[in-house]
Image (cartoon, helix red, strand yellow):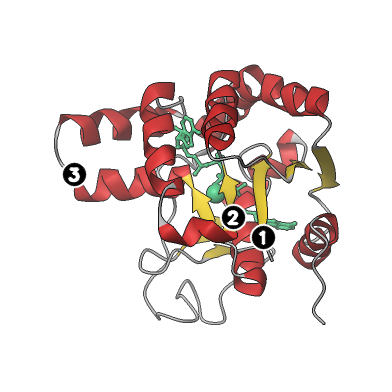
Amino acid sequence: MMAYLVFLGPPGAGKGTYAKRIQEKTGIPHISTGDIFRDIVKKENDELGKKIKEIMEKGELVPDELVNEVVKRRLSEKDCEKGFILDGYPRTVAQAEFLDSFLESQNKHLTAAVLFDVPEDVVVQRLTSRRICPKCGRIYNMISLPPKEDELCDDCKVKLVQRDDDKEETVRHRYKVYLEKTQPVIDYYGRKGILKRVDGTIGIDNVVAEVLKIIGWSDK
Ligand code: AP5
Ligand code: MG
């Protein structure tokens, strides 16, 4: 199975949740630029690390040149021979154009850009109740997908945490940035004829099944 996928959708659409499940099923690597930057912030206490931390806490976007460089490096790793699921990238038209020219230079092209539609109020509710395992990154929700034991990761048994940018005010700002900067990316893929829309409110299993259908995956 090979597919080159872009996952689009507002913060809290479920991009990370679906991508992790699809990676487990198909072996196609899940690449989240948000996860990469959170990792840099955690490990690098230098100027760059601090700058990225500040941008993310405000819910603004990291500059295109930096994001593009990080993605180019990641896509050049060996596991991407199986394709990729890009989660949270591209988020601006400049990023989308960069990705296109990078893929073109390798004689590859995107299989689909999948957009998960979720309205703002659902997003706010999902993100203010989201919890993450700080060790393995597994994503929980205290309303729709709670851990078995109170606030502990089912696998690692460590205490779940909230993301710094999941306060309601920041979530609403991230949503605004999404409409402003990423809506044009949706139009960009629409014009290229590779945009697929999936209702992101129908439950995790149903959404995952829809995406697997789009890429033509079957369990047999
Ligand atoms: P990033 O980490 O990409 O955040 P985001 O796009 O805002 O998306 P989230 O991770 O918040 O949501 P998600 O769609 O992954 O949802 P999840 O699966 O967790 O980016 C963070 C920051 O990094 C940006 O603000 C920016 O500063 C920087 N950055 C990253 N990429 C960048 C780029 N390309 N350019 C510039 N800057 C960049 O699910 C959410 C919750 O809902 C969970 O609790 C989950 O359990 C629940 N849930 C999911 N699906 C369902 C469902 N179908 N039904 C019920 N509950 C569900
Ligand atoms: Mg995510």
Residue identifier under label 2: 83
* Residue 74 in picture, x, y percent from top left: 41, 47
Look at mark 1 in the image and give the residue it sits on.
2
Dot 1 amino acid type: Met
User: How far across and how far down the image is residue 38, in percent?
Assistant: 36, 46
Secondary structure found at label 1: loop
Closer to us: mark 1 or mark 3?
1
Query: Pointer 3: what residue?
Result: 44
State how far apart marks 2 and 1 are (Cα).
5 Å
At label 2, which amino acid type do we have?
Gly
Is residue 182 at all visible to an observer of this figure? Answer: yes
> Quadrant where the C terminus lies?
bottom right
Q: In the image, what residue occupies the spot 83% across and 47% down?
A: 198
Q: Taking 185 as reference, is 205 left or right?
A: right
Looking at the rendered image, the quarter that the N terminus falls into is: bottom right
Image height check: is 24 above or below 212? below
Q: Are marks 2 and 1 in contact (CB under 8 Å)?
A: yes
The residues tagged by marks 1 and 3 sit, at their Cα atoms, a distance apart of 34 Å
Marks counted in the figure total 3
Give whichever of discs 2 and 1 has the lower sequence position. 1
- Which is more N-terminal, label 2 or label 3? 3
Helix, strand or loop status at disc 3: loop
Q: Nearer the viewer, residue 100 or 185?
A: 100
Q: Quadrant of residue 70?
A: top left
User: How far apart, in angstroms, are the residues tagged by discs 3 and 2?
Assistant: 29 Å
